[in-house]
Image (tube, rainbow, N blue to C red):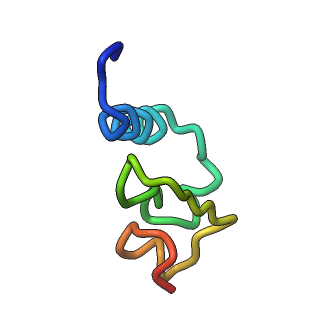
Amino acid sequence: MANATKQQQLDELKATIEASGITPELREQATQLVFGVGNADADVLFIGEASGTNEDLPGNPFVG
């Protein structure tokens, strides 16, 4: 995606991770991938170490 927006690139990355099975150990305990949400053009990025049940159920980070 040469001229893709940042959001399109993130969407493609998420789809690649989900399709490739990169995290089989997580699939044993989680119901879904908890990927980032928010403005792809933000100046600040928060990275969490591990999502828990409160994040896994809705699929959104930092809700618990």
In the displayed structure, 45 sits above or below 11; it is below
Quarter of the image with the N terminus is top left
**Residue 2, how many percent across, how many down?**
35, 13
Residue placed at 30% from the left, 24% from the top?
Answer: 4
Tell me if 53 is positioned left or right of 11 in this view. Answer: right
Residue placed at 43% from the left, 54% from the top?
Answer: 42
Q: Quadrant of residue 16?
A: top left
In the displayed structure, 34 sits above or below 7; it is below
The residue closer to the viewer here, 60 or 17, is 60
Q: Residue furthest bottom?
A: 64
In the displayed structure, 59 sits above or below 3; it is below
What is the count of numbered marks? 0
Q: Residue furthest right?
A: 49
Q: Quadrant of residue 22?
A: top right
In the displayed structure, 2 sits above or below 16; it is above
**Residue 57, how many percent across, how many down?**
40, 75
The residue closer to the viewer here, 60 or 20, is 60
The residue closer to the viewer here, 41 or 35, is 41
Q: Residue furthest top?
A: 2
**Residue 37, how many percent across, how many down?**
39, 60
Residue placed at 39% from the left, 47% from the top?
Answer: 41
Residue placed at 38% from the left, 48% from the top?
Answer: 40
